[in-house]
Amino acid sequence: MINKQPMTNEIETIRSTAAIGVDLGGSFIKIGLISSKGRILQFKEEPTPEGGPETILQGILTLILTFVKEYSNEYEILGVGIGLPGVVQFKEGFVINPPNMPGWKSFNVLQFFKSKLDLPVFIDNDANVMALAEAVWGAGKDCRQIVCLTLGTGVGGGIVIDKELYHGASGGAGELGHVIVQAGGRQCGCGNKGCLEAYLGANYIIAHTVELLDSYPASILNKIYSESAELTPPDILEAVKADDPLGMKIVDEMAYYLGIGIGSIINVFNPDMVIIGGGLCNFGEYLLGPARKVAEECAMEGLFEDVKIVQAEFKNRAGVIGAGSLVFGKNEYRMSIND
Amino acid sequence: MINKQPMTNEIETIRSTAAIGVDLGGSFIKIGLISSKGRILQFKEEPTPEGGPETILQGILTLILTFVKEYSNEYEILGVGIGLPGVVQFKEGFVINPPNMPGWKSFNVLQFFKSKLDLPVFIDNDANVMALAEAVWGAGKDCRQIVCLTLGTGVGGGIVIDKELYHGASGGAGELGHVIVQAGGRQCGCGNKGCLEAYLGANYIIAHTVELLDSYPASILNKIYSESAELTPPDILEAVKADDPLGMKIVDEMAYYLGIGIGSIINVFNPDMVIIGGGLCNFGEYLLGPARKVAEECAMEGLFEDVKIVQAEFKNRAGVIGAGSLVFGKNEYRMSIND
């Protein structure tokens, strides 16, 4: 018995540290066990349960507890990071306006976990955690002033300075999709007009493409649309690759607004890297090539030379990696409710 | 003689510390002796000499040396801060593109002073130093995340986080006048189209007002323009105060674009204060009142509540105060060339 105790302790000390990262999306909850070097050690995804915050968070909690049970012997799990849609008050625990998820506004996420989980829990906006993943371990790992723009259904953003997220006064900074690029322009889902998201969000791009189908009768997108009654961003990308005139027009318009958005970002932040992530970054150089040219025109003299404009390295698992990295970070504010 | 030495030392130690702040404008060089509390102890201004960087900097040097000679007995002068127009590479010492000042691009300002002055010299962009003055000692002294927008001939900006200027990769951050608010819109002096400055810069506002004179024959601005062959922002302000229809239209347009700019700033930075400075902030609530309403519409839910939108406290001496505050600041990078 005297020998047993030191042996257990010895085993304790050689476990590697890891974090649990959770990425809550409208369709799936993704969970990963993340090493202290940002590697995904274990990964799982499940459909997001339908219901209010309590139902969804209960689903997340069950997944977390499964991971804790399965991997605690092998890894010392330091905490849980969760990426959530909407404006996340990461200190207080509230999620203000997650799109398509009613009932969250007055629900305290951190309090929910505090009573049920014996691990520190950190929350942040989903685009923020993706930006953090890229800044710490991905495309931006050698840069200091990084702005990340995520192009998906919506357009999100994250600002990472010296490997720390810039949160602003209450955690809502980085809503780059809602910078106004066309005053009085296209209606945005946020209620405003002319936001970058209204020109670059996947839904808007698809709707705009459908509007233009009649003007491009020879486009292969007509055939796809008449057969499947819908268009997707990959359809448009295929059209672009085939030099389809409508596909080219759409990607040119996307590149124009993306370039204008990046140009404004350069003038405001003078970053050393702008990282483009999210589903639409699959357009790769078809989109980034012309967007860079527009950004160069928009940027002030002396600032464009400093910046690399690149595609994100992590694909659809950036969220869990970034959520995990919340646990390894050193941001003082994040700790407040967990201490 | 034995008694004299300690007495001198005693006098030495009771001198208050102060900094010299210099504000280089197109028309005037302003210089101030600034206390460690941000108070102007001495002030002087002289016309900016005509010529290249060497001529102008020689003029500044002469003023600095006069101040050092006159006030060194009374104050321990810790250093010199200088606010300069254009993109200022504050670490390296270069000023990239000062408007209306040719020949500066390859001229090293810090090197110029290094060989001629036995004091540390710090340089920064003029809008940045104004922002710093307001953030440290002015309207923003109780706030942490501050964005300052200066409305003058051009539109400048400064971002101050926890009392430190955010510079970006090479010192060019905060060019808020060159955020694009109207893609493909009005021509801006920077060569681009649709910049905030093209809608809010004093020159553009005056030009736009003159364009509209014929459509507003009853406007008092017609009378002023026909008598003096020019219009100034104070003329427009007088017209607004008199409920003049053209004056009202112009200030409404200014407020619209200012509100859109502030709304975008709120969505990107989630600041606790936005400070409006520069000559046009004399429009006060005639401009800020309606601009706040537009900004509220543009801001994401949950972010507008966090922010105060206020007028700058320091008027045309903010530049020297802010330049002086460069000396008292703690920014690690600034020191590099002086160490």
Image (cartoon, coloured by chain):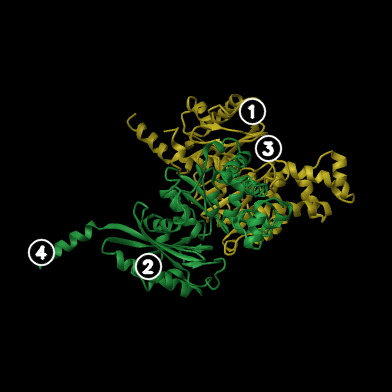
Chain colours: A green, B yellow
Q: Earlier in the sequence, mark 1 or mark 3?
A: 1
Which chain letter matches label 3? B
Q: Which mark is residue A64?
A: 2
Q: Is residue B312 left or right of residue A25?
A: right
Q: Secondary structure at mark 1?
A: loop
Q: Which residue is mark 4?
A: A3
Which chain letter matches label 1? B
Q: Which residue is mark 1?
A: B102
The residue at the point 67 percent across, 32 percent down is B100
Q: Which residue is mark 3?
A: B191
Question: Do we see residue B244 in this rendering?
Answer: no
> For the residues tagged 4 and 2, is the chain the same?
yes
Q: Position of residue B263 (x, y in %)?
A: 63, 56
Q: Earlier in the sequence, mark 4 or mark 2?
A: 4
Amino acid at the residue labelled 2: Ile
The residue at the point 61 percent across, 53 percent down is A200
Amino acid at the residue labelled 3: Gly
Image marks 4 and 2: residues in contact by CB distance under 8 Å = no
The residue at the point 65 percent across, 25 percent down is B51
